[in-house]
Image (cartoon, rainbow, N blue to C red):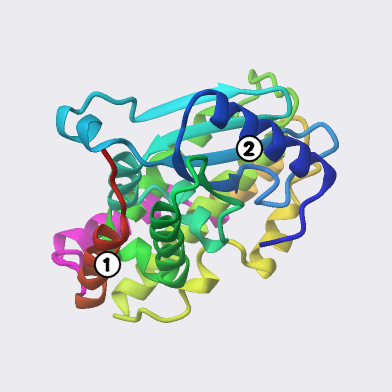
């Protein structure tokens, strides 16, 4: 795990108290947002994902919140139930998949249950060690999710948009280009039937980060930069290439490795009464 800065340490302490007070027993905590992507400024919050284990009763009755967002004094937290985590991975959510290119900040067991702790640790290790295969579980939907997010970001990159705080023009542009690189590189590997070098697709990839950081300082709308990016990273053309690959059955079935990974993740995921 990386060395925490002062803001991250304070945020993690605040999060621990919240999880204890709200009786979340078993969970994995990961960092996300601007801190993970090296976009943080002095005013940036610390963002966390908390993937928590529901009880067996909650699973069987489906009586649980799939996702919950809370804003604490020193951090912002998205709580996601483990079943929803599987759904998001299978859907190819790039924001979720990139999370597992790091180890968890915290493995929670406030009941001091060593068995549950060991199972969660094993799950986190499985996710980290097999991070390069997670995109294959989506069976092509990873690309579709990236394109959908790109389309959404194009609507934010407009002159009438009021950019405030961390929601700057440059950050939105950063997200747009990042999603394009994810999708185009993965599509290229599918076309060439290569499962290698996925480390170069998903963060942290320092070369890509340095490229994208150039947008970080752009606070206000810039038509020229926007147009240059849209020409170089054309999501409509990418969408056509994705549809062509899909129509030619490039994503028809999971690879044997991906199927084995899914079985392993299911095996390593704990439940409790």
The residue carrying mark 1 is 264
Nearest to the observer: residue 18 or residue 165: 18
Q: Is residue 10 left or right of residue 25?
A: right
Where residue 112 appears, as percent x and y from the top left, is 50, 47
Question: Mark 1: which secondary structure?
Answer: helix
Callout 1 crowding tier (Cα within 10 Å): few <14, some 14–19, many ≥20: some
Is there any visible trace of residue 266 in the rendered image?
yes
The part of the chain drawn in magenta is 232-255
Nearest to the observer: residue 215 or residue 204: 204
| Residue at 69%, 31% in the rendered image | 14
Residues at marks 2 and 1, CA–CA distance in whole angstroms:
28 Å
Q: Does residue 141 belong to the magenta stretch?
A: no
| Residue at 51%, 32% in the rendered image | 78
Q: Is residue 4 left or right of residue 22?
A: right
> What is the number of the mark on residue 44?
none
The residue carrying mark 2 is 47
Where residue 127 appears, as percent x and y from the top left, is 42, 63
Is there any visible trace of residue 167 in the rendered image?
no
């Amino acid at each position: 795990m990386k060395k925490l800065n002062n803001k991250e340490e304070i945020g993690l302490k605040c999060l621990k108290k919240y999880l204890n007070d709200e009786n979340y027993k078993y969970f994995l905590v990961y960092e996300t947002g601007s801190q993970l992507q090296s976009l943080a400024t002095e005013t940036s919050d610390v963002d966390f994902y908390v993937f928590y284990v529901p009880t067996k009763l909650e699973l069987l009755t489906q009586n649980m919140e799939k996702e919950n967002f809370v804003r604490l004094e020193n951090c912002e937290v998205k709580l996601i139930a483990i079943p929803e985590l599987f759904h998001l991975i299978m859907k190819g959510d790039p924001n979720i998949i990139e999370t597992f290119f790091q180890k968890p900040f915290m493995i929670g067991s406030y009941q001091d249950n060593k068995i549950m702790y060991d199972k969660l640790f094993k799950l986190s290790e499985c996710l980290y060690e097999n991070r390069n295969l997670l995109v294959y579980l989506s069976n092509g939907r990873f690309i579709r999710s990236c394109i959908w997010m790109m389309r959404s970001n194009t609507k934010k990159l407009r002159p009438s948009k009021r950019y405030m705080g961390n929601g700057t023009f440059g950050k939105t542009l950063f997200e747009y280009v990042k999603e394009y690189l994810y999708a185009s590189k993965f599509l290229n590997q599918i076309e060439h039937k290569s499962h290698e070098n996925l480390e170069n697709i998903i963060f942290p990839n320092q070369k890509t980060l340095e490229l994208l950081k150039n947008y970080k300082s752009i606070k206000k709308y810039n038509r020229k930069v926007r147009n240059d990016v849209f020409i170089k990273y054309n999501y409509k053309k990418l969408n056509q290439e994705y549809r062509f690959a899909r129509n030619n059955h490039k994503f028809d079935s999971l690879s044997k490795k991906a199927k084995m990974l899914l079985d392993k993740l299911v095996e390593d995921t704990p439940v409790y009464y």
